[in-house]
Amino acid sequence: MYDRWKKDQAYLDIVADLLASEQVQALKNYEHHHATTRLEHCLTVSYRSYRIAKALGWQAKAVARAGLLHDLFYHDWRVTKFEEGSHAYAHPYIAYQKALEITDLSDLEKDIIVKHMWLSTIAFPEYKESYLVSFVDKYSAVLEYFTGLKGRLKRKLKKVQTKRKFK
Ligand SMILES: [Fe+2]
Ligand SMILES: [Fe+2]
């Protein structure tokens, strides 16, 4: 698990109230991209984006907070279907509505959350910070997916080897 954020007090101060909320903590009960929980994924996207934004002199605080809230939803997208459209279209708006229940959001933070599925959705982000979080989300999702795949393959291989041993 990516946990460099745990040692960064400046980052922790920015997201402390969100991280302490029941709504955000509940994300640890949901699997995301096979290898992580949804909370781990949101923290990873938030912290990676925050570090880049900070280095570039961009709006790092908004990036950290909106990054943490970008997947604030509690359904299994493989099971729950929406009339409004695909999961890619629906869940950023669900996350935005749920985020409003725990904090105020600036226009920038709203844009980061609502447009984070850009390229799967067609509405262009309005801020450079939104592009950043969107790209970090995709990058993290790919890494998480392949970490999960590697783990599953290793477990399968071990099973086959154990079976052979006892034949
Ligand atoms: Fe998402
Ligand atoms: Fe995500």
Image (cartoon, helix red, strand yellow):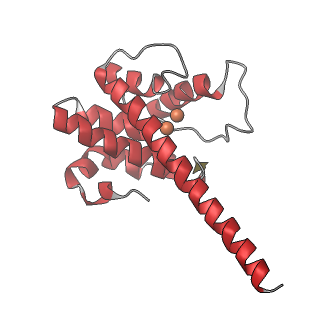
- 155 with respect to 108 (left or right): right
- Looking at the picture, how far across and down is residue 50, in whole percent? 28, 40
Q: How many labels sit on residues?
A: 0
Question: Which residue, as the protein is rendered here, is positioned at the far bottom?
Answer: 166
Residue occupying the point 20% across, 49% down: 10
Q: Which quadrant, please, contains the N terminus?
A: bottom left
Q: Which quadrant, please, contains the C terminus?
A: bottom right
- The picture quadrant where one finds residue 63 is top left
Look at the picture and state if 156 lies above or below 25.
below
Q: Is residue 8 visible?
A: yes
Residue occupying the point 48% across, 22% down: 118
Look at the picture and state if 26 lies above or below 83.
below
Residue occupying the point 44% across, 28% down: 113
- The picture quadrant where one finds residue 58 is top left
Residue occupying the point 36% across, 29% down: 104
- 32 with respect to 127 (left or right): right
- Looking at the picture, how far across and down is residue 117, in whole percent? 50, 26
Look at the picture and state if 152 lies above or below 40.
below
- The picture quadrant where one finds residue 134 is top left
Q: Is residue 102 visible?
A: no
119 or 45, which is in the foreground? 119
Look at the picture and state if 24 lies above or below 56.
below
5 or 99, which is in the foreground? 5
20 or 57, which is in the foreground? 57
